Amino acid sequence: MAMTAQTRRAPADLAEVVRFVDQEIAPHANAFEKAERIPREVLSRVAELGLWAPFLPSESGGADMDMVSLGRVHEEVGRGCSSLRSLLTVHSMVSASVHRWGDQAQQEKWLRAFAAGEKLGAFCLTEPDHSGSDSTAEGTTAVRDQDGWILDGRKKWITGGQVADVLMVFATTDSGMSTFLVEADRPGVRVTPLPHVMGTTASMLAEIEFTGVRLEPSALLGPPGWAAGTVMTNALNLGRYSVACGSLGIIRAALEACAAYTSVRTAAGVPLRDLPHVRQMMSGMVTARDAARLLCQRAGALSDEGDPATIMATWVAKYHASKAAAQAASDAVQIHGANGFSPDHQVARLYRDSKVMEVIEGSTQVQELTIAAEAYREVAQ
Ligand SMILES: Cc1cc2nc3c(=O)[nH]c(=O)nc-3n(C[C@H](O)[C@H](O)[C@H](O)COP(=O)(O)OP(=O)(O)OC[C@H]3O[C@@H](n4cnc5c(N)ncnc54)[C@H](O)[C@@H]3O)c2cc1C
């Protein structure tokens, strides 16, 4: 989706992001969900505010934003609309991968356009016929021929797939799993929208089929066979961090909605806010929010320091924040009673969106395997 970003300027400071979310995102998020898309003007505003990939270096059109600050931006956007935050997440994953692993020509070709939001990226790993949790089981193949590669296969649940210009595709080659940058308008690429998805419904998900797609050698990102341990690990780590911060945003949105609602709604002659079980749930949300914030900040700070401990810290942050968001959104619906089911309130959307956070970027169960394994390693030392 080519966008003009003539009015783009240095990235907004956080106060401006908060204003943007309060005025232009949060009040419309239910309408975005109903329309199953984020309007083009909103995507252009994200570009105008410099929020698509502000962590890229300034020489590539970014703003050298550190990870802690990026996390705050994704938290705020997640507070307003998880679908938009999801688009930021996958675009960030693609932009960061090209920055980290791309050769000079790839960086020159893509990074400025990514930073400006003139070209949007999508992350294409999951397949319809394989477990998404097992990212090594790719059925998509890229076969060498004298002109480069021929790509065949199918990807499903691709966030932003309906509007992305560049698809970062993981495929099996004769050297192992590799990563390719594929323009979405190449012959042989077929994008089919996935409508009526339960959560992050406005994130314009798609199934994408590749049939004999011809790719030049320059489509390969990093050496062949490199994807699994390097490109994918780094991209997923950033994605997980973004989802953790976005989940924190969901907890805050649930808390704010409940604080407002329980102050005006009465039951048994008193405002709901005076009922002990409401106070108990509100206390749980406050505690979950604060814990999520500290865990996200720790993961971001370790990343900024270049400390590899950021990987486990990010797992832990995402594990806590996504579970806590699902609990907070569930409690928020409970507190709202029947109104919790109404499109006039936002908590039903928070409930649907929060469930997604427990599935994507490493499901809760897969995270438990990883985090517990680390605990045993620590004890064994
Ligand atoms: C809204 C949405 C957006 C998405 N966006 C993208 C995207 O942009 N790009 C992309 O590539 N993918 C995307 N996905 C796919 C997502 O990454 C996968 O859904 C996720 O990796 C889980 O894979 P799966 O759905 O195949 O579930 P499965 O792997 O089939 O898992 C099913 C269940 O089994 C559990 N499980 C799996 N393995 C284990 C194990 N070893 N031990 C214990 N339990 C296990 C899981 O926790 C889960 O409960 C998206 C999904 C959704 C819902």
Image: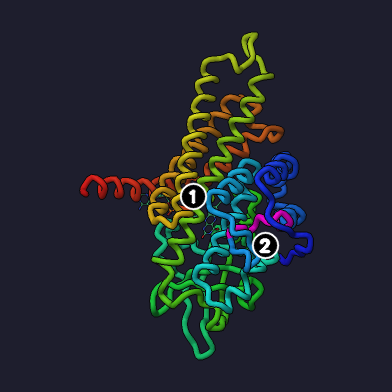
The local secondary structure at tag 1 comes to helix
Could you tell me residue 52's position as x and y percent? 64, 58
**Residue in the picture at 57% in, 82% down:** 214
Q: Is residue 197 magenta?
A: no
The image position of residue 313, as x and y in percent, is 41, 48
Residue drawn where x is 72% and y is 42% of the image: 19
Q: Is residue 54 above or below residue 147?
A: above
Q: Left or right: 350 with respect to 299?
A: right
- List the residue tagged with mark 2: 163
Q: Is residue 116 left or right of residue 360?
A: right
Q: Name the dominant secondary structure of the magenta segment.
A: loop
**Callout 2: 10 Å neighbours few (<14), some, many (20+)?**
many
Assign a secondary structure to mark 2. loop
Q: Amino acid at mark 2?
A: Val
Q: Position of residue 134 (x, y in %)?
A: 40, 59
Q: Earlier in the sequence, mark 1 or mark 2?
A: 2
Q: Residues within 10 Å of mark 1 (few under 14, many from 20)?
A: many
**Range covered by the magenta-colored residues:** 47-55
Report the front residue among 162 and 251. 251
Between 196 and 214, the residue placed more toward the observer is 214
Is residue 324 or residue 96 the one in the foreground? 96
Note whether residue 218 is visible.
Answer: yes
Residue bearing the label numbered 1: 300
The answer to whether 179 is drawn above or below residue 193 in the figure is below
Kindly identify the residue that appears in the image at 44 percent across and 77 percent down.
223
| Label at residue 148 | none
Q: Quarter of the image for the N terminus: give it.
A: bottom right
Query: For residue 50: magenta?
Result: yes
- Give the vertical position of 277 relative to 359 (above or below): above
Question: Which residue type carries mark 1?
Answer: Gly
Q: Residue furthest left?
A: 380
